[in-house]
């Protein structure tokens, strides 16, 4: 059986609800420290939340290498997203984004099976580089690197942060667009970074054809991105859901100016040094957990979040006044005094 790391970027399904060519497609990307068993549980929850209007529900697995590695990947992804903001674009960042789109065009000429290693699907790719979260401490020469050198050292020509699930998500979105499906990208935690980078790649892939966004909706729970991290055209197609006490989402969402390399180094060091404290905030019953957002905890906030996600998945985004009023927004969940006195 494949290991957790070997399943990075693989497609997974809830066995009782296999894809059947339905007109609605749900692509789920999991977050930090979430092994494949947890994502399969999340997929089951999403199937139940859409039972009245069945989707093709597909998970794109973002494998975990431990919290520090996942955190470092997230920070690098955040830094790359900052370079895609219209006011912070550079010729180098745009050239790199074009290289992703070119890579995606090669992948779209192939029929990828669910368990393929997406980085070996194109024969002229160099072997993927490994990511060691301790390098930031062990290798003094990193302090002397510029951002472009650092990025190339870790990822070469691959998308920063999580290349396999990022490219697989972009590929599956294009596949869904070509099939005429309405596509819901549902992402948790680091998955929102992966989704944002994939959407930027799609924007460059389609170029002047801007109607591709009409088929895509993004729902992020426990989000670690800002609306500014998304392509402008996608912001009106997005709802983010965050619990008031979700310190991981709050900490990572509010990172700004990470395009400045010295600032990124400082933030990497601070967050890695404090990673044990953050790690305590992402267990299965925490305010950042997928369990809370998908209604698996016996709390009012968990129940409200699940009902909201179900509503967003089953309402017509083009005609529903409620959905139109919610897009774009970051919805904050919180416990009231009455909730604490009378839990579900």
Image: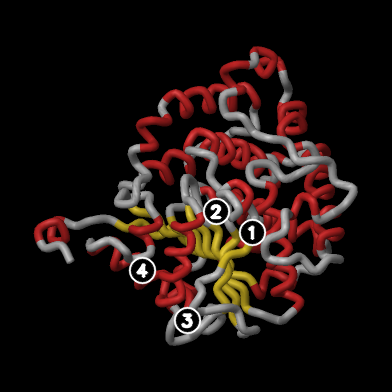
Pointer 2 and pointer 4: residues touching (CB < 8 Å)? no
| Quadrant (top left, top right, bottom left, bottom right) of the N terminus | bottom right
Residue underneath mark 4? 306
Q: Are marks 2 and 1 in contact (CB under 8 Å)?
A: no
Alpha carbon of mark 2 to alpha carbon of mark 1: how far? 17 Å
Mark 1 touching mark 4, by CB under 8 A? no
Closer to the eye: label 1 or 4: 1
Image position, residue 288 (x, y; %): 37, 49
Residue in front for this viewpoint, 55 or 35: 35
Q: Is residue 38 above or below residue 306?
A: above
Looking at this view, is 125 or 149 the one in front? Answer: 125
Residue 10, numbered circle: 1
Secondary structure under tag 4 reads: helix
Q: Residue at x 84, y 47 (%)?
A: 99
Residue shown at the point (65%, 25%) measured from the top left: 261
| Distance in Å between CA atoms under marks 4 and 3 | 14 Å
The residue carrying pointer 1 sits among few (fewer than 14), some (14 to 19) or many (20 or more) residues within 10 Å by Cα, namely: many
The numbered mark, 4 or 3, whose residue comes first in the sequence reads 4
On screen, 267 above or below 49? above
Residue 240: x and y in percent read: 47, 59
Q: Is residue 328 visible?
A: no
Q: Nearer the viewer, mark 3 or mark 1?
A: 1
Look at the numbered disc 3 and give the secondary structure of its residue.
loop
């Amino acid at each position: 059986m494949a290991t957790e790391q070997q399943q990075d970027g693989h497609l997974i399904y809830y066995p009782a609800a296999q894809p059947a060519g339905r007109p609605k497609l749900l692509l789920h990307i999991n977050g930090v420290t979430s092994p494949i068993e947890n994502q399969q549980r999340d997929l089951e929850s999403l199937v139940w939340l859409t039972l009245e209007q069945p989707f093709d529900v597909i998970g794109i697995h973002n494998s975990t290498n431990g919290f520090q590695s996942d955190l470092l990947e997230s920070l690098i992804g955040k830094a790359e997203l900052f370079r895609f903001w219209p006011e912070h674009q550079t010729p180098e960042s745009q050239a790199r984004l074009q290289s992703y789109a070119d890579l995606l065009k090669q992948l779209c000429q192939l029929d990828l099976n669910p368990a393929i290693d997406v980085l070996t699907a194109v024969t002229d790719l160099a072997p993927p580089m490994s990511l060691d979260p301790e390098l930031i401490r062990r290798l003094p020469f990193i302090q002397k690197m510029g951002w472009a050198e650092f990025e190339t050292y870790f990822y070469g020509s691959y998308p920063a942060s999580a290349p396999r699930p990022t490219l697989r998500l972009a590929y599956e979105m294009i596949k869904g667009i070509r099939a005429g499906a309405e596509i819901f990208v549902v992402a948790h935690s680091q998955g929102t970074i992966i989704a944002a980078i994939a959407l930027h790649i799609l924007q460059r892939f389609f170029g002047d054809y801007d109607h591709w966004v009409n088929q895509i909706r993004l729902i992020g729970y426990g989000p670690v991105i800002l609306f500014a991290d998304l392509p402008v055209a996608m912001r009106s197609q997005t709802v983010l859901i965050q619990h008031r006490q979700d310190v991981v989402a709050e900490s990572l969402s509010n990172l700004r100016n990470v395009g400045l390399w010295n600032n990124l180094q400082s933030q990497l060091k601070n967050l890695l040094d404090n990673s044990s404290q953050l790690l305590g905030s992402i267990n299965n019953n925490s305010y950042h957990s997928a369990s809370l957002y998908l209604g698996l905890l016996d709390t009012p906030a968990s129940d409200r979040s699940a009902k909201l996600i179900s509503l967003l998945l089953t309402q017509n985004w083009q005609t529903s006044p409620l959905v139109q009023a919610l897009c774009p927004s970051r919805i904050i969940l919180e416990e009231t005094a009455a909730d604490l006195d009378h839990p579900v």
